[in-house]
Amino acid sequence: MIPKIVPGRRDGKSSFKQLAKYVTEGIEQSGEPPEKYSWANLTQYITKESVLNALGENVEKTIGVEIGNVTSLANAPAEMYAVAQRADGRVKETVYHYILSWPEHERPKTEDIFAAARDTLAALGMSEHQYIIAIHANTDNLHAHIEVNRVHPKTFTTADTYRDYLKLHRAAREAEIKYGWHHDNGIFQVVEVNGKKHIVRNDDYVDPDLVPTRPGASRAEVWSGEESLETWCKREPATDLKAVLKDKATSSWQDVHRALARHGLELRDAGGGGFKVADVSDDTPEKLGKPLTVSASAAFRFMKRADLEARFGPYVPRAPDLDIGPTTRSYKRDPHKRLESRLARKELRDDLHARFQKEERTARSRQSEAKILLEPFAAEDRRRHNELRDSHRAKREAIRQDATLTPSQKQQAYMLAKITVMRSRNQLVQQITEERKVRATLLPPIPTWREWVAQQAQLGDEAAISALRGMVYQEGRDGKKRKAREEIEDEENAIRPAIPADLDPQPHNMANLIWKVTNNGRINYSFNDGQPAFRDDGERITFGRKAVSNDALALALAYSADRWKDGIRITGGDFAFKERMVRMAVEQGIAIKNRELRDLQGQVQAELDAKNAIERHSRNSARQALATPASVSARDGDIEAFLRDQDRTAQFSHAITQDKRYTGPVVAQNGRFIAQQLGEHRYVFHERSAFSNPPEEGQRVTIRYQSGKATVQTPKTKSDRGSR
């Protein structure tokens, strides 16, 4: 059984209705209405053996349909649409479609096909989702289409399809074992050891949907059962050749020849302006004259002769004395020996793990028996807690019955007794915890897998030595992958904690921001108008876009500084982004821990200090100018222009002369107007003629209007109120 995932439309607008119509084509011609079959009992709906096509010919098409979690086949598309519209989060593609196909010589029972399809749905974690399974018999290969709504009909969460092809290929092998079907080639394969079938990873398999192969090479693989030279070239050799061509140090044809020679390949001139790749790894006399070849354009689509000749000059064959350095795996090898070796290692590992589990169970049993001996200590711990509790109760009762104490004294005594017992309880808990740690060290230990394998390896166990080497190699590979991932992530513009911490994101309520948790556990923050602000990934704060507003950056900085108290650092390959973040951080008083940004922080801080000094000097000069009548008299003709010179954002208004009062300092005056400041950047002009006794400049007063006349009141100070 071969699974094939059908890609959705590139515009993300796959249609439930169109897909359901296609996979169930011919169902209504069987004479039974689709509404008859309800999802409640999940009955299998099998059509007649044949249906009529448009020409009136007998053609097997849809021979069976099963629906799940929808009321009827006719209503299924509408119901799937309704559920998809309620998806939790933005989902670009909700239609999921894959095919299960059987070889031409195999005709499984329809009920087994439906059961196998349900098994694959369970493997994908979508057995509770809405689905349609339709069996088609219109080709040489019997196959089943499965249409699934990725959105759960109750929780409205979207199923994760990451690495779905691995799950489907393993489920296919499990179904073949379960129903006794032929074992197809795939990412996983079935091998039999000592009469028992095992599912193991097939490292030699290349998914044709992921790496397109020409029809001729594909047919050769089917007939021979071996991987074609074209397919093999697209894997390790292609990866190494790409790396060499991207390297600027590559300066000649011999560098290209060296990269291919390490895999037992040679680039040759095919004539007519093309290249061919020859397998020269087999040095037997009968193969030297007629090596296996493949077109370079088919094996390495990224390699263009015109580009290489523009870079290195006209084609130069491989030098006879070319030093190729260390070689890697070549195309020709014995797959049977490799499989036997791998199965032998697997059998040894299984035996090793079985021995470990046996010793682990024995150790747990010994520890359980030893814990029985600790029960008296547990009873003693409870007795000490009860004794402390009873002592506290006795003290409270004595305080309550003491007639010599006043109510106030009793409250103080109660409080003192409570503090004393809390301190004693904390001391007792700490003491018992330390005693339990000491007793735990006396229990028989339970070995861990790594420790046990290391001990067995020290005794010379070959399986343990192999397993230990495998763990060391895997740790090295994981370390390289982690380092590579960190290097990639460091290129992303982000805010990270100064001390790396694996923390889950937690929602924070911030002014003007709305948060939403995504299906993968991240938290997206956006402004009230729906514009994105930033995203909390747990270990970093990211933005997901290049153009980020200053408001979003400022809020992200404040959020990060509050989240990571030990400090933050800025990562990313964009220096302009780092400079913006540093300037905002300095303005907000947030320290950035990047060593390489310390000089920039100092420079920005110096600029900010100079700017603040200039602003302070300007404000002091403005105050002195306002306090000096001479400066006003020089501008008697335009008091508004004078104030505008001192305050560029000043807002002016004229006083209302009916039942209105204004409070604030008098900041300027001329022959016609008196200017009073009401607040920051707000000024009001009073007509001098409205006053019988005008206020003095620099004096804080309350001006009150009644019937167009202004009276001046001086607000009372605290000392005035205190003297009364």
Image: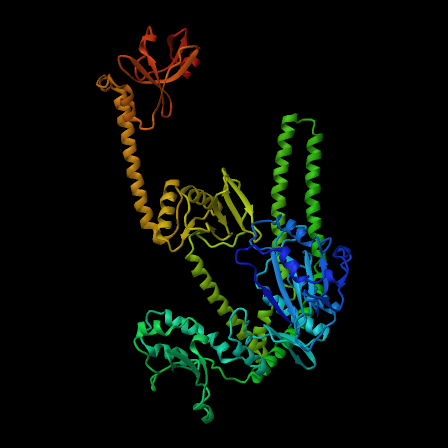
Quick check: can you spot residue 233?
yes
Instruction: Give the x, y percent position of residue 134.
Output: 69, 63
Q: Nearer the viewer, residue 417 or 651?
A: 651
Which residue sits furthest front? 55
Residue depicted at 31% across the width and 72% down the height: 310
- Give left or right: position of 609 versus 418: left
Residue depicted at 53% across the width and 55% down the height: 11
Residue depicted at 70% across the width and 31% down the height: 400
Q: Is residue 138 above or below residue 254?
A: above
Instruction: Give the x, y percent position of residue 144.
Output: 67, 67
Q: Nearer the viewer, residue 65 or 525?
A: 65
Quadrant containing the N terminus is bottom right
Quarter of image, res 192:
bottom right
Residue depicted at 39% across the width and 44% down the height: 585
- Give left or right: position of 490 versus 185: left
Instruction: Give the x, y percent position of residue 50.
Output: 73, 68
Instruction: Give the x, y percent position of residue 298.
Output: 46, 75
Q: Nearer the viewer, residue 200 or 606?
A: 200
